[in-house]
Image (cartoon, coloured by chain):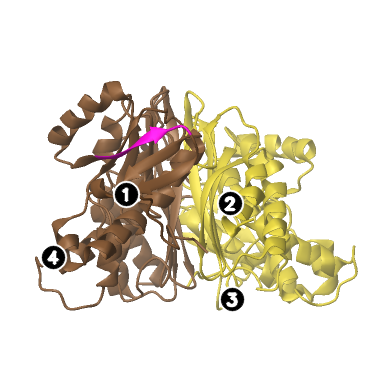
Chain colours: A yellow, B brown
Amino acid sequence: MTEFELIEQVFAPLGGARPDVALGIGDDAALLRPPAGELLVACVDTLVAGVHFPPEMRAADIGYRAAAVNLSDLAAMGAQPRWATLALTLPAVRPVWLRQFAQGLRMALAAHEVALVGGDTTRGPLTISLQLLGSVPDGVALTRGGSRVGDAVFVSGSLGDSAAGLSLFGTAAPARSPAAWLTGRFRRPTPRLALGRALRGHASACIDVSDGLLADAGHLAERSAVQLRLWADALPRSTALLGLFDPDTALRWAATGGDDYELCFTVPPASVAVIEGLQRRLSCRLTQIGEVRAGAGVVLYGPDGSQCHWPNSGYRHF
Amino acid sequence: MTEFELIEQVFAPLGGARPDVALGIGDDAALLRPPAGELLVACVDTLVAGVHFPPEMRAADIGYRAAAVNLSDLAAMGAQPRWATLALTLPAVRPVWLRQFAQGLRMALAAHEVALVGGDTTRGPLTISLQLLGSVPDGVALTRGGSRVGDAVFVSGSLGDSAAGLSLFGTAAPARSPAAWLTGRFRRPTPRLALGRALRGHASACIDVSDGLLADAGHLAERSAVQLRLWADALPRSTALLGLFDPDTALRWAATGGDDYELCFTVPPASVAVIEGLQRRLSCRLTQIGEVRAGAGVVLYGPDGSQCHWPNSGYRHF
């Protein structure tokens, strides 16, 4: 079997069985049937070895994570994911690595019924670029630009776990230990797709927390031309994070650690009760962490009413 | 200006002004309006520095080429290109390089009215992955799978120029010289989009020549479950190629050199006259280079009726 045939064999099972795929992997391009009356939603995210994940990370986790961080972008738009294409750059074809990578990718894509419909495999330093396509009914997509003064600011799940988990990466952690749970939050983040769709018509703006809460809330504030006032006390922190780290470190990670892939969204006062209902229905913790005011930027208030500052807030791509 | 702002500023003008872009660069994902009743066409291609182009290639040429090789995939499907997203991995942000890259990319995209609607910029070894989205009316897309016994095999333009041009890369060549023309064919290939669309309803199968004629004709033969018999004498070679290289080298490049980005397609006998008309209308050389027979694979016959063989036919990705 040539390496080319191996790659075909490894990725063919990720083609899925969606009726909206007219032609999948194997031609010059894929042919897809977008649903009538819906907008197409398109995004791309790249993971570079040594930059976005430790080079020693397991292949299955790399594959899973590549899909999860992209699915998170569609979640933030309130979209239904449908199709993916993969641009995979590899230093060499190692069959075991490739099969495990595909297995992790498949697990994350199959959980949301996404079909891999094409791609390009090239030789070079390990780089994974995944493109996701989804759809959303016209007029209900969530964007970063709709927050209004008086809205409540919410976030899903807990914050800072992934940054803490990355700091523990490579240390020996017994299965089911808090440390293993935290590294798991880095290795296999949970994209909040059901939540994103449930927020259609309720949230006024939404973003996924990939660069760190303060940085991403800043993008939302900028696009909406408002100020977000956040309360440090309210930032949801997991038992594992609080058990393994001192309160200052835990707060810093919750506020500025990247890779959470939770959703940060704003809600008009009239819809706050809906959010409380959603929390129960989706079994997903949803916490109000602040409010929208007139002004610009993000301000984080400590329990004593003073502003919190960190020298480097949020992940910088360069 | 931060590097992040620079990147935004450089790529924003590539957003174009398409009415089918509901939301472009700047949110978690783009929102696009696919045309009613058409299929969506999606492809991705990656260029790695030192693998797909010489590291010293000019930034504007790299940007142009990244778009052109992707547009060529849509041409091979008979599609109308619409939108692009860019996954750009850079070792460092060099403003001049970035502006020139964007300028080259813009030139190639704007020539076909393609809007850049999103992307991801990351730090790492120079890697450009472009995703293109287009559309094609349902039922008329060109695929690799429709060749029938008795069809004629055609190719557009001339073959082998790009491989010859790459071999001359970096040598001093006066402007307008044959050597400069050949390197230009490598640096800025011409995607055959108008031809691809004109072949709808006429070609039985189509592929773009990216890995080399024999390799790509082989893909077409395999998908169509036929044999392609090609005539070495008929392979179109440019005056520049024949003027600078001996006939054996020119033939080898025409048959196996990659990066031509011409279209190789098959046509039922009843449609051959249409192809001759197209040649005039599109001012694009279209040459019959063989015929479709029962069997498998690709056979290239020399002028004396013997089969031509080369040890390595076609570009191997690994």
CA gap, disc 4 to disc 1? 36 Å
CA gap, disc 2 to disc 3? 28 Å
Tell me the SS state at disc 4.
Answer: helix
- Looking at the picture, does residue B102 appear above or below residue B70? below
Query: Quick check: do tags 4 and 3 share a chain?
Result: no
Magenta-highlighted stretch: main secondary structure? Answer: strand
Residue A78 in view in this figure: no
**Label 2 belongs to which residue?**
A70
- Looking at the picture, does residue B260 appear above or below residue B176? above
Query: Quick check: do tags 2 and 3 share a chain?
Result: yes
Residue B86 at what x, y percent from top left? 42, 55
> Which amino acid does the dot numbered 3 rest on?
Trp
In magenta, the rendered stretch is B288-294
Task: Say which mark, if any, is on residue B15.
Answer: 1
Mark in the foreground, 2 or 4? 4
Chain letter, disc 2 residue: A
Q: Considering depth in this image, is B52 or A152 the residue closer to the camera?
A: B52
Residue B293 on the magenta segment: yes
Tell me the SS state at disc 3.
Answer: loop
User: Could you tell me which residue is drawn at 39 percent across and 72 percent down?
Assistant: B2
Mark in the foreground, 4 or 1? 4
Residue B165 at what x, y percent from top left? 25, 66
> Which amino acid does the dot numbered 1 rest on?
Gly
**Label 3 belongs to which residue?**
A310
Disc tally is 4
**Label 4 belongs to which residue?**
B178
